[in-house]
Amino acid sequence: MLRSMYSGISGMKGFQTQLDVVGNNIANVNTSGYKKSRVAFQDMMSQTVAGASAPTNIRGGINGQQVGLGSQIGAIDVIHTQGNRQTTNRELDLALEGDGMFIFASGIDQDQFNLEDADLLYSRAGNMYLDDNDYIVNANGQYLVGEGGSRIQIPESADSFSIQGNGVVNYVEDGETYTAGQIMLAKFSNPGGLEQVGNNMYRSTVNDGMVGENGMPDLITPEEQGSASIVSNALEMSNVDLSEEFTDMIVAQRGFQANTRIITTSDEILQELVNLKR
């Protein structure tokens, strides 16, 4: 069987995966806090036809001869660059400007809230809400983590509230200003190592470089230790560039077509070999 046929198959599989990734990026072009992905290819092992030889007194050295056996997916990276900011004029819409992620906790008893027993997830999506008990939660009902690993509650009787760039949540009641809590962030030296779990959320892995110990993040104050600033009344949008994605889609499509042509050509060669007997 011709090597080129198997190389063409590997190329088709790779470009199909790239089209899957590009399609997902385009589908999430308007998803708050979404970070685009990209596919990196690498060549597969090569078959050595003839080995290299060293130079001698009467002859120079000879390079080895190798035939490549196709390509494969080397990595699918998540690119955590800053997304554009969209003004919403809604107090509980929060955008992050800089490094860091919101921390969300779920799966624990409301009356015995303990961060060490919680299922912790991380996100850049800042569309927050108040639940029936006046705690700040995200669209999935997970609690936004504040200072000391606590939840942040804004009393129903509050006349108004505001969220500062350093995460401090203030509210006004009967003309007096009170502090409801302070939003904390988590930082990762390798955010590309986070596991995507859907719903704009990420889960920590052993390779994300989380700032913390024993699987627990350090609660970092916004605007400190190089962390992000919180911008209220705005959302961070997707970092997907449609022009870039359409270009990648065209390249992947043409690459897929070229590899199908390799298979067609290889098949025609095999057909000619079979027909030699006739």
Image: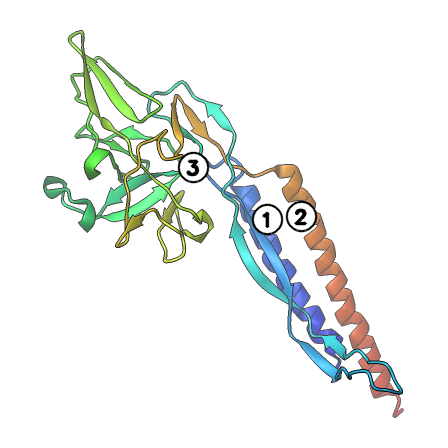
* Residue at mark 2: 248
* Residue at mark 1: 22
* Residue at mark 3: 99
The residue drawn where x is 37% and y is 20% is 90
Question: Which residue is outermost to the top?
Answer: 175
Of 56 and 164, the residue lying toward us: 56
Identify the secondary structure beneath mark 1: helix
Cα–Cα gap, marks 2 and 1: 7 Å
- Image quadrant occupied by the C terminus: bottom right
- Amino acid type shown at disc 3: Asp
**Residue 116 screen position, x and y as percent:** 19, 49
Cα–Cα gap, marks 3 and 2: 27 Å
> Position of 275 compared to 92: left or right?
right
Closest to the camera, between mark 1 and mark 3, is 3
Of callouts 1 and 3, the N-terminal one: 1
Of callouts 3 and 2, the N-terminal one: 3
Quadrant in the picture for residue 148: top left
Of callouts 2 and 1, the N-terminal one: 1
The residue drawn where x is 79% and y is 78% is 63
Q: Determine crowd level at label 3: few under 14, some 14-19, many 20+ residues with C-alpha closer than 10 A.
A: many
The residue drawn where x is 40% and y is 34% is 226
Of 275 and 141, the residue lying toward us: 141
Q: Determine crowd level at label 1: few under 14, some 14-19, many 20+ residues with C-alpha closer than 10 A.
A: many
Above or below for 252 versus 144: below
Q: How is the image coloured?
A: rainbow
**Residue 65 screen position, x and y as percent:** 78, 79
Above or below for 53 versus 181: below
**Residue 43 screen position, x and y as percent:** 66, 67
Tag 2 near tag 1, CB within 8 Å: yes
Q: What is the count of numbered marks?
A: 3
- Amino acid type shown at disc 1: Val
Q: Determine crowd level at label 2: few under 14, some 14-19, many 20+ residues with C-alpha closer than 10 A.
A: some
